[in-house]
Amino acid sequence: MRNHLSTRRVFLQRGLTLLAAAPTVPAFLDQTVMALANPLDTPLVQQPSGRDGKVLVVVQLAGGNDGLNTVVPFADDAYHRARPGIGLDAKTLHKLNDKTGLHPSLRPLMDLYERGSMSIVQAVGYPNPNRSHFRATDIWESAQPEREQAGSGWLGRYFDNACSGADPHAGINIGDTLPLAMQGERVTPLSFERPEGYRYKGPDRERYEQLNGLKEGAQAARVDVKAPGKKSQTTEASQLDFLHRTAMDAQVSSDDILRVTQNHRPGAEYPRGELGEGLRLVAGMIRGGLPTRVYYVHLGGFDTHANERGRHDRLMETFAGAVSAFWADLKAQRNDERVLMMTFSEFGRRVAQNASGGTDHGAAAPMFLFGPRVKGGLVGDNPSLTDLDNGDIKHQVDFRSVYATVLQSWLDTPSKPVLGQQFKLLPIVKA
């Protein structure tokens, strides 16, 4: 450990810095150097690849999306009584059946719904819900409600269990901070707001190109290799060489991402804003053949305590426009069949509106899944608006059942090692 720390100090002193990737890549370097006995002989190549296989896209609706004004139980008189000022008129909704409709701004999603490419799971939550943004977000991202301080996220544990030994391309987050959901113990995905921000800026580029064999005739520095049958020796110099190589790997990753995103000509027009831009980048990376299994994007602003109607209307318009454009883009690429999208928010809102024309923190809410391989339609009944838990909707489906289904039926990995127990699977993904 002393040698490792000394090596890391030398590494940092020599200016091997990854601008815009500092929260993620150094952790990856730490974990990798400590894990590998002979790192230079270990190829940093992802095994379970999304290059030609299945891809998961997670969309976080941050702030607590109002599920009742998203998937609206318009035939329930209790809905209109509880929301005299912000309740939506049935005539403006996009009807899913004779009791339920989608928010007026979600019209672009109806094409997906009518094609059977959208599934809506009603009243998703967990026992004893927490109504704090920070704690509730940690619960959804860790999938460990029983732990006050989670050390890893459910997708991070998926990476650890199914993608061990992979390069950071296993997962990519579009944003300035890597969410807990993506953090594992051994694999740390990439995180950036813009591809051009994820760049290696250190000196000695020539040296790193030599270490990575990028120049003609160049040979990477090797660890001391003893006679056959004897253990190789990992020295401080070999660890430093490995750090050099890994820094250059990050540069290569950056070049790959820039290449595929800059060359991407979208097959649809995306709305402006963080979600539209994030999904446009994701579509470009999928089209470019990156080996990423999981992409993670965000749309914030859902904490609608006051004047909800106009604000939530705009959020729904943004959400629907970005999601619709993404699937049109993937269809034009002919990549739509191998992609699944899942949305979540840390909680829904309370059933009754408040005095400010908004809604306060609630509990259960719907989740959306998109893609040609989902079993389209509504899953579960409209939640009761009279049998409540302290003014909130009672959950019908544990969110970990949705995660378990995605892990097992889509990512083809056992869910119990990731979630800690076996949760009931839902009929939402086609075999």
Image (tube, rainbow, N blue to C red):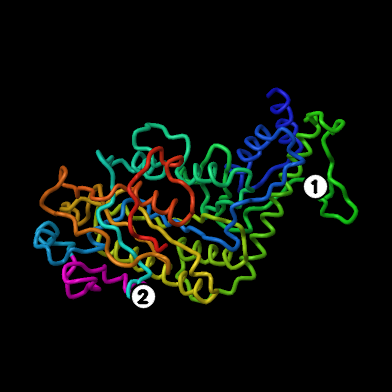
Describe residue 57's horizontal placement relative to residue 265 as left or right: left
- Element marked by disc 1: helix
Going by the numbered disc 2, the residue's amino acid type is: Arg
- The front one of 306 and 344 is 344
Image height of 6 relative to 329, above or below: above
| Direction right: furthest residue | 217
Q: Which of disc 1 and disc 2 is earlier in sequence?
A: 2
What residue is disc 1 on? Answer: 208
Q: Position of residue 141 (x, y in %)?
A: 41, 44
Circle 1 residues within 10 Å: few <14, some 14–19, many ≥20: many
Q: Position of residue 395 (x, y in %)?
A: 23, 48
Say if the magenta span includes residue 89: yes
- Per the model, the C-alpha gap separating discs 2 and 1 is 50 Å
- The front one of 431 and 215 is 431
| Direction top: furthest residue | 2
- The front one of 21 and 37 is 37
Q: Which mark is residue 115?
A: 2
Occupied quadrant, residue 52: bottom right
Image height of 378 relative to 183, above or below: below
Describe residue 45's horizontal placement relative to residue 41 as left or right: left
- Element marked by disc 2: loop
Magenta stretch: give its range.
88-112
Say if the magenta span includes residue 355: no
Circle 2 residues within 10 Å: few <14, some 14–19, many ≥20: few
Residue at the location (33% across, 55% down)? Answer: 426
Quadrant housing the C terminus: bottom left
- The front one of 407 and 32 is 407
Q: Position of residue 288 (x, y in %)?
A: 62, 66
Q: Position of residue 4 (x, y in %)?
A: 70, 28
Going by the numbered disc 1, the residue's amino acid type is: Tyr
